[in-house]
Image (cartoon, rainbow, N blue to C red):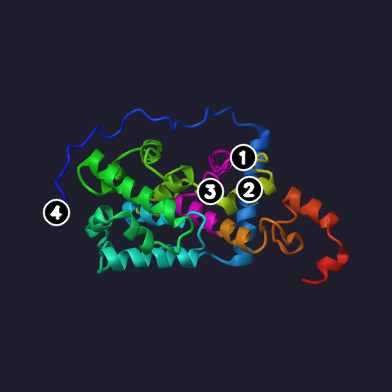
Amino acid sequence: MSRPREVAAPLFGETSAGGAQQTRWTGQDAVEQKRLSAMHRLLLEASGQPAPREVWDPLTQLIYSLCSSRTKTPESHATLRALRERYSGWPTGPNSWDEVHWERLRDAPVPEIEETIHLATFADRKAPQLKATLQQITTRTGALSLAFLAVYRTEKIRAWLEQFPGIGSQVSAAIVNFSSLRRPVISVDGHHQRVSIRMGFAPERSTPWQVEQALMRIVPTDWNAVTMDDHHQLVKLLGQTRCTPNQPTCFLCPLVELCPTGRENIRNYPAVLQSNY
């Protein structure tokens, strides 16, 4: 039996997710923009061009991003496959993302959803958040779809999305940048946050939102949504392999000459430790 259609609430109500006040562009901003551009070039030289992303519809990207937070990529992909197989949400043909239907997932009991996404970190928290978000989207819009967001400004889309359980700045940025919305925004996950702070683009203890704001202020003018996606993937890879939380291998990092933290660490690394790599 199909779910009764609920009366839609106003689409965009009052939100608190406004952008930060922009200050005047400075000479230091120009220097940092060149450094960010050089960082991107060096990462491309070291790792190569990231593989083209398989672009999904915004709702599928929301589900994936909400489940994948603090979860390794293979487990995240396996989680989405499990959801697809259990709830038939994913389309079967090419170029048919407008035919995505996740109503069975929305209507499933929380324990069943938790079992399905058990590979995701904090599945016990994410399962009720996921169900509540899908229910609230349906209530607010009258249907379980985010295709309508394509006509709205990026800032308004993100503010609206961040009203739902489990969706913060990193997830909203991922939805608008990685999905078919393809907006020019840098998504900052934990790896990107750590690397950017060590590189000196944002102060110590900056939140992902603050790091994003610092980066977007200096992003090169010729970067588009795909470039920002590529940059995120390259920085994430660096954070996973070189710029790790506890033992960064700065002497093997392609960014060491650009990175104040890396240069300081190199001075402090014992030569015998470096010789082991």
Q: Name the residue at the front extreme.
A: 111
Q: CA distance from mark 2 to mark 1?
A: 10 Å
Mark 4 or mark 1, which is nearer the start of the sequence?
4
Is residue 132 on the magenta stretch? no
Viewer-side label of 2, 1: 1
Q: Answer few, some or many: residues within 10 Å of disc 4's Cα (few below 14, many 20 plus, some between 14 and 19).
A: few
Amino acid type for the residue under numbered disc 4: Ser
Residue under label 1: 206
Identify the disc placed on residue 2. Answer: 4
> Magenta part of the protein: which range?
207-233
Q: Name the residue rendered at 51%, 64% in the picture.
A: 50
Left or right relative to 175: residue 204: right
Left or right relative to 79: residue 152: left
Q: CA distance from mark 3 to mark 4?
A: 38 Å
Q: Are marks 2 and 1 in contact (CB under 8 Å)?
A: yes
Q: Are marks 2 and 3 in contact (CB under 8 Å)?
A: yes
Amino acid type for the residue under numbered disc 1: Ser
The percent position of residue 80, horizontal first and vertical second, equals: 37, 63
Residue under label 2: 196
